[in-house]
Amino acid sequence: MKSKFFRSQLPGSLILMLIFLALGTMHNQVAPASAQGPNKVTVGHDYRHDVSPPLRDIKPRKMPPRHEHEANINPHINSAHQNQPDPVVQSSSFAAAMPSPLLNFNGIPFPGVACNCAPPDTNGEVGLTQYVQIVNEGYQVFNKSTGTSVLGPVSISTIWSGFGGVCETAGGGDPVMLYDQLANRWIVSQFAGTSVPTDECIAVSTTSDATGSYNRYGFHLGTSFFDYPKIGVWPDAYYMAMDVYNSTGTIRLGPQPFAFNRAAMLSGAPASFITTGITGGASEDLYLPSDLDGSTLPPAGAPNSFVEWPGSGTYKVYHFHVDFGTPNNSTFSLFANPAAAGFTVLCPTTRNCVPQSGTTSRLDAIGDRFMFRLAYRNFGDHEAVVTNYTVSSGGVAGIRWTELRNVTSGPVTVFQQSTYQPDTIWRWMGSAAMDGSGNLAVGFSASSSSIVPGLRYAGRLAGDPANTLAQGETVLFAGQGSQTGTSNRWGDYSDLTIDPVDDCTFWFTSEYYPAGVTQFNWRTRIGSFKFASCGSGGPTPTPTNTPTNTPTFTPTNTPTNTPIFTPTNTPTPTNTPTPTNTQPGITIPSAPQNLTAAPAKGKGIQLAWSAPASNGGSPITGYNIYRGTVAGGETLLTSVGNVTSFKDTSTTRGQTYYYIVKAVNAVGESPASNRASAVAK
């Protein structure tokens, strides 16, 4: 989530990045090449890719210790949602019939190798023989049969050792761990940048062994603040959704979809990405891309379905058709918008939300978006995607889970949806998935003023009554303590995934705290479980005569349209982004002036320039420096702050270099300055 730990980047990261630019062959360069067509398609290319040594042979990267620090308070998205009575609440529980954990062990603890940050953003995935967990800013491989560590924990940056640039020196967090079970490969990603996250770093393993070598890629997405990346595996691409802010991270611009060339990245070839730009603007709710589970492919040529959080009252389903051969044929368009059952947004004006035992400090439940993942499965006779979000229900937080059907072929239907709120415990930070037999489970955190935060899971069999988690719930780990401070942050997501070998075993990971009440001392937990009936046959459909929006339980205590908290003395956080259109008249700056280039004293080339004649009505926040070895062939070299000089030391003696400079303000990037050149010393 926004501003993980960029404020504590290494002072030398910029220097190291410049050194990197002198290493090896540069592939396809940094700046995305725009190809504007009817769909406003933009094509970008990796600026570097290579194959790493086996991870098990790389010396773990030593990260300098950082001071303890928390991420900024999550800015609320200015959704137009209207609170309504919740007609689909499961307000009482069934007898506990959920299977007990098979494995249950600790994952990466604070400080996340060297992050010293909160929250950890716990994420993980299961493969053929291994389970891999990733947090801010650590990576660990476990034997999935025993839970013993195979490698790590090591810094995520270890994967990027020798790659150079911001992927190696300025990884910023929000990591995502996936397993491409169609190819039996691992995907590791996190965003990166010297001051704000402008790049996405993606590594794809060359085998099914997570300790082996990786095809590594660096992608420069632009000059904006690209936040909250969520990725899904699909046959034709790795699809990603991001929440985009202006270059200073102060103004929300809206969500943006991306598609990365999966075939190229599996083979280690130069790779491109395609995006259709920001959709909807600053008030549009966030969406997630579909992430494939199971070995049955989607229908041939099916687009990836992005589903948007129903702040609008509907589940907006977008289709991303991507064509890497003819990019301008790519489209991102609204396909369907079936209605969501009414709900009340949880804690709409404060992040001081979920109570804990032993402290008055509360936790952020992030109730304004879907929780990771949007899990897709093709059963042959129907397609299903399942996901969840947190809502206000009965005076506490409840898990709203939903199953949509036939999202690629249509007609899209809400097959079932329900708010799981069986008692007065607060449940949040969920993750949902479905096994190969159509059984569904949701893992989540649970807390109240009388219990510390712990981890639980609930579920249903495919033949259970619709709209119910009829197997009850069980405790994965009770938790031991409570968290105070850290801006109320409690992760941005957890992760429930399915074992690709048996297509039945669920694996869940999230965070907890040890005994006591402490601020920076989180722990993580990993556990697995399996329904006994899975694998005995295909899914048993829910009876077709059960309306999809008819509650199995009718609550007597569900609030109408009153949020849990409506504080009169809690101001909206001052760093909540304001839509761009609230500042009329602001434009991009004019071009920087009087750029000069000259051989530098000692080594390299010294650049100097003057500020633009006009800042566009918004302060200049920095400059982007472009360099090439031929006039007109300049690509992005680096970004600097609001300074008017730069010494480029990543040069080769005797080589002529050409430069242009562009200014950046809150709206974007200026036209280019005049071109200047010099011969490097």
Image (cartoon, rainbow, N blue to C red):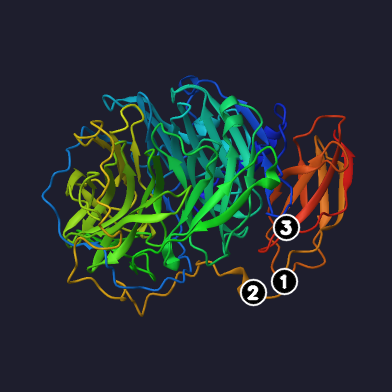
Residue at left offset 64%, top offset 27%: 269
Q: In this rendering, does residue 110 appear at all? A: yes
Q: Could you say whether the residue bearing mark 1 is in a helix, strand or loop?
A: loop
Residue 492 shows in the view: no
Q: Please report contact status of discs 1 and 3: CB closer than 8 Å, yes or no.
A: no
Sequence-wise, the earlier of marks 2 and 3 is: 2
| Front-lying residue, 228 or 318 | 318
Compute the Cα span from label 1 to label 3: 13 Å
**Around disc 3, counting alpha carbons within 10 Å, would you say few (fewer than 14), some (14 to 19), or many (20 or more)?**
many
> Of helix, strand and loop, which one carries label 3?
loop
Identify residue for label 3.
669
Mark 2 element type: loop
Residue placed under numbered mark 1 in the picture: 617
In the rendered structure, are the residues bearing label 2 and label 1 in contact, judged by CB atoms less than 8 Å apart? Answer: yes
Q: On the image, which quarter does residue 587 sit in?
A: bottom right
Numbered label tally? 3
Which amino acid does the dot numbered 3 rest on? Glu
Q: Is residue 629 left or right of residue 77?
A: right
N-terminal of the pair, mark 2 or mark 1, is 2
- How far from the left and from the top, in percent, is residue 66? 46, 44
Residue 583 is tagged as: 2
Image x and y of residue 528, in percent: 26, 35
Q: Residue visible at 55% across and 39% down?
A: 301
- Residue placed at 86% from the left, 45% from the top? 597
**Where is residue 216 drawn, in percent x and y?**
58, 30
Q: Nearer the viewer, residue 631 or 418?
A: 418
Image quadrant where one finds the C terminus: top right
Place of residue 100 in the rendered image (x, y in percent of width and height, measured from the top left): 17, 38
